[in-house]
Image: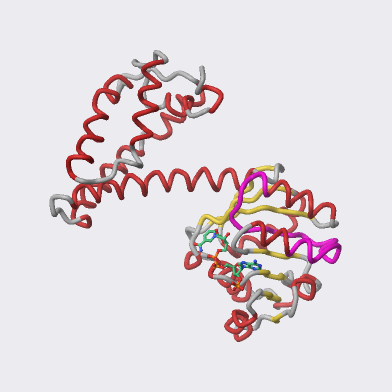
């Protein structure tokens, strides 16, 4: 009964847009697709999608429009070109962007008569529609409730709030944790490789170590939320005393310390401001820009 499923338009058929459109087709939705380079519609048309010549033609086909382009500037251009032809539809923007961009696009969409949902995809294309994929949503809650079952085709759905910027804030915060981990892992690999130790072999030690350390995150979170950072685990003073050893070893072994040098500056600031007995959770407070000149 494919006709009972909500028709969906997908604008943007890069790696992610193609995965989203393909998942909708597999779930039985009528899907209309548009991409700047028309050649990319081919594989989806072979799966049953209808190709559209323009964004306006594409959005005319469906009450639900999913857009996934490289950047939000591209989304703004498409929205401008659509004018009020997007009116009465729900626009779900799954393009990576900032909270401010999401708020701006939500306001534009409202001016053009559309409901707006912003989304942050917590998956790579190959994970879409699989058990570990989920998407964060924010914006128009009524539109979210109306289309939630359809959006669930992509994976889990996680509502973050009516401020359209919240999905992007959650998304970027989660990715910040990931980039922090990647930076640490790459620095460790660069360091062990200086003595010919295989990075893959070293990962057998690194993964359980980092995993065990990460188990402390809820407790650090409690400290950050409460502002009570005193610790009996590992004080700022101990970390401040040890950290120069890292920068010296990077230098001695011929590895750049550029990713880690800023951490020394914040440990110095913690000590200068009298936080020697606090745990590392104090750092989240020290990162607030209004504290820098305190
Ligand atoms: N890939 C991932 O793992 C992943 C995960 C989460 C979120 N995302 C986000 O999803 C979005 C798309 O990523 P992707 O991996 O699909 O990227 P991609 O494969 O590089 O595709 C980019 C898409 O944007 C279109 N585009 C670029 N510039 C445009 C313009 N000026 N006007 C109109 N369309 C334009 C491209 O059209 P053409 O085909 O004509 O170039 C293509 O459809 C990004 O915001 C990304 O951060 C990706």
Q: Check if residue 98 falls in the magenta segment.
A: yes
User: What are the residue bounds of the magenta stretch?
Assistant: 78-101
Q: Check if residue 114 falls in the magenta segment.
A: no
Q: Nearer the viewer, residue 131 or 135?
A: 135
Q: On the picture, is 116 further left or further right than 111?
A: left
Q: Nearer the viewer, residue 131 or 171?
A: 171
Residue 242 in picture, x, y percent from top left: 24, 27
Tell which residue pokes out farthest to the top in this image: 274
Residue 192 in picture, x, y percent from top left: 19, 48
Residue 68 figure quarter:
bottom right
Residue 151 figure quarter:
bottom right
Residue 106 in picture, x, y percent from top left: 75, 50
Against 154, residue 234 (above or below) is above
Identity of the residue drawn at 79% across and 55% down: 109
Identity of the residue drawn at 34% across and 16% down: 276
Q: On the picture, is 75 further left or further right than 253?
A: right
Identity of the residue drawn at 53% across and 70% down: 15
Tell which residue pokes out farthest to the bottom in this image: 46
Colouring chosen for the image of the structure: secondary structure
Residue 157 in picture, x, y percent from top left: 60, 54
Identity of the residue drawn at 74% across and 80% down: 53
């Amino acid at each position: 009964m494919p006709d009972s499923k909500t028709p969906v338009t997908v604008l943007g058929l890069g790696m992610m847009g193609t995965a989203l459109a393909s998942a909708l087709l597999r779930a039985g939705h009528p899907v209309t697709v548009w991409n700047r380079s028309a050649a990319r519609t081919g594989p989806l048309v072979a799966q049953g999608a209808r190709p559209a010549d323009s964004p306006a033609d594409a959005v005319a086909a469906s009450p639900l429009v999913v857009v996934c382009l490289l950047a939000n500037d591209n989304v703004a251009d498409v929205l401008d070109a659509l004018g009020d032809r997007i009116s009465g539809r729900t626009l779900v923007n799954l393009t990576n962007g900032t909270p401010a961009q999401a708020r701006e696009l939500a306001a534009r969409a409202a001016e053009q008569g559309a409901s707006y949902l912003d989304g942050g995809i917590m998956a790579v294309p190959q994970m879409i529609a699989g058990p570990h994929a989920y998407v964060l949503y924010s914006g128009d809650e009524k539109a979210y409730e109306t289309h939630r079952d359809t959006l669930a085709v992509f994976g889990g759905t996680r509502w973050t709030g009516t401020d359209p910027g919240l999905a992007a804030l959650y998304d970027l915060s989660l990715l910040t944790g990931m980039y922090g981990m990647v930076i640490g892992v790459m620095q460790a690999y660069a360091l062990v490789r200086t003595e010919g130790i295989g990075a893959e072999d070293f990962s057998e030690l690194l993964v359980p170590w980092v995993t065990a350390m990460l188990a402390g995150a809820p407790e650090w979170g409690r400290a950050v939320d409460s502002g009570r950072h005193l610790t009996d685990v590992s004080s700022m003073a101990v970390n401040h005393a040890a950290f120069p050893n890292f920068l010296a070893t990077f230098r001695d072994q011929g590895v750049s310390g550029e990713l880690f040098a800023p951490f020394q500056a914040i440990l110095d600031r913690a000590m200068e401001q009298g936080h020697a007995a606090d745990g590392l959770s104090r750092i989240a407070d020290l990162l607030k820009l209004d504290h820098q000149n305190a």
